[in-house]
Image: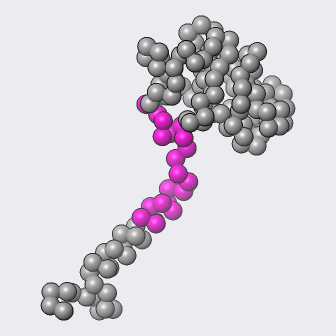
Amino acid sequence: MAGKRTCGCGVSRRGLLGTAGATVAVTAVSACGEPPNPQEVRRGRVIGQTDEVPEGGGAVFSHSKLVVTQPEKGRYKAFSAACTHGGCTVQEVEDEVIRCLCHGSEFDVVSGEPLSGPAKEPLEPFTVTIDGTDIILD
């Protein structure tokens, strides 16, 4: 085979580079650990519209795993929608309370602090910016 070079072990340069590339890719994935969480992927992007978040209540945006509340007119808060008790996605925001129906945990719409149920830790907070009617994750 003219023009095909191999290393001392009989593997072509292309094969060796392919193996090296795969090793680097596996190493890079291993070094990074878990894939980025949905919130990190959404930073700088529109996650919803202000008309979807009622004053005194909120809305769960499952595609970004966020719950956005509007405790008072024009003031928006964002939290991870993953319940800190069992990891279920919170399902509703009513009567100024974020509720996880899996095990009954309830969280404050202003602070994300647990109010009742088995959850002991607050929901992870995030900041959002409002641009017109767009809610953008910072």
Q: Quadrant of residue 78?
A: top right
Across and down, in percent, residue 96 comes to 73, 16
Q: Residue 104 versus residue 78: which sits nearer the camera?
A: 104
Q: Quadrant of the N terminus?
A: bottom left
Q: Where is 114 relative to 6, above or below?
A: above
110 vs 30, left or right, is right
The magenta stretch is 25-44
Residue 87 in sight here: yes
Which x, y percent locates residue 38?
54, 41
Q: Is residue 73 left or right of residue 18?
A: right
Q: Position of residue 39 (x, y in %)?
A: 54, 37
Give the residue drawn at x 84%, y 28%: 116
Taking the spot 34% from the left edge, 74% from the top edge, the residue there is 18
- Residue in front for this viewpoint, 52 or 21: 52
- Please identify the dominant SS of the magenta region: helix
Q: Residue at x 69, y 37 (%)?
A: 89
- In reply to whether residue 121 is colored magenta, the answer given is no
Residue located 31% across and 75% down the image: 17
Q: Nearer the viewer, residue 33 or 94?
A: 94
In this view, the residue farthest toward the top is: 73
* Horizontal side, residue 2 vs residue 70: left or right: left
